[in-house]
Image (tube, rainbow, N blue to C red):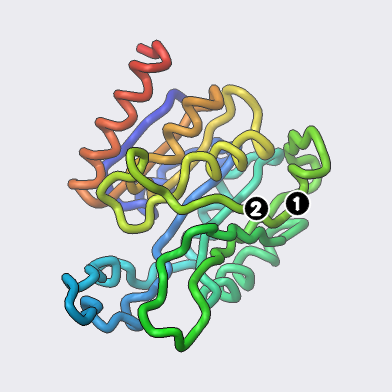
Amino acid sequence: MDSSFILGDGLGTIQKLPDKSIDLILTDPPYDIRKYSTGNIHLPGRKPLNNDIAEWDGAIPIGKYVKEFRRVLSDQGNLFVFTSYNLFGKWHRQIDPLFDTCNFLIWHKLNPPPRVYKNSFLHSCEMIVCAWDRGHTWNFTNQEEMHNFFQSTICMKPERLNHPTQKPISIMKHIIKIASRPQDMVLDCFAGTATVGVAALLMKRKYFLVENNQEYYKIASDRLERAKKRLGIT
C-alpha cells in the first residue's frame, strides 16, 4: 500500500482498510472541549483571544475508533493517541482490554498559553495513550528515549499553520522513530495539517492520512507537496 491522503470521514475510511495493514497509529482526535467553551476570551484593552477551537472539537465515538484501530494494526504495531485529561479514562477503558499493554506518555509544553487571571494551573501538559502487543516494534537507542515524559515548545511560526491544535513535528518524529521501522505504514485519521505525514516522510515511512475538513485538507496537501519537493520525492 502506497502513501495516501484522503478527504473524508476518519471512521468510515479506516473501516475500509484491510486487517493488519497499519504498522503505527499516531493520531490526535478531538478533545471534546466544546462543552467547556466560553466563547472568545475578552481581555481588557486588547483584542479578544479567539476560541474557535471549541466550534468543532466535539465528541467522537471512541469505542468504534478503537475497534478499528485494533483490527487494522499489525501484530508488531503500536498505537499512540493524543488526548486530554478528561478523556484519558474513556480511551484507556476502550483500549486496555484489547492489547497486552496499555500505557501513557506526557508531553510537557515549555511555552503553554498564559492565563490572564492567575486562578488555576496552566494547561502545560497533554496525555498520549499508547498500546501494544508482545512482539511489537521498539527502536530505543538509549535510556533517555525510553522516558514516558518529553518536553518541547508548542508549535510556533514558521512551522505553525492555520490550525488551532497543530503539534510540533519534533514530537511526531520522535514517536515514529522509536515505534516503527523504515517503510512502515503510519495512520493518522485526524490529519489536520499533516504533521504526522510530513514526519513520516522525514523518517522514511509511508503514511495513510484522513482529514474531514476541506480547508485543512488543502493546507495539508500543499504542505506535503512542499515536503516531498524538499526531500526529492516524486
Q: Position of residue 89 (x, y in %)?
A: 60, 75
The type of residue carrying mark 1 is His
Secondary structure of residue under mark 1: loop
Vertical relation: 43 (above or below) 182? below
Identify the disc placed on residue 165.
none
The quadrant where residue 44 appears: bottom left
On the question of residue 86 being in view, the answer is yes
The quadrant where residue 45 appears: bottom left
Vertical relation: 213 (above or below) 84? above
Q: Determine whether label 2 and label 1 are within 8 Å by CB.
A: yes
The type of residue carrying mark 2 is Phe
List the residue tagged with mark 1: 147
Q: Nearer the viewer, residue 194 or 1?
A: 194
Task: Assess disc 1: are there few (<14), some (14-19) or many (≥20) residues with their C-alpha within 10 Å of its C-alpha.
Answer: few
Q: Nearer the viewer, residue 45 or 39?
A: 45
List the residue tagged with mark 2: 150
Q: Position of residue 219 (x, y in %)?
A: 24, 39
Q: Residue at x 46, y 88 (%)?
A: 119
Q: In this view, which residue lies farthest toward the bottom?
A: 119
Q: Residue at x 33, y 38 (%)?
A: 158
Cα–Cα span, label 2 and label 1? 7 Å
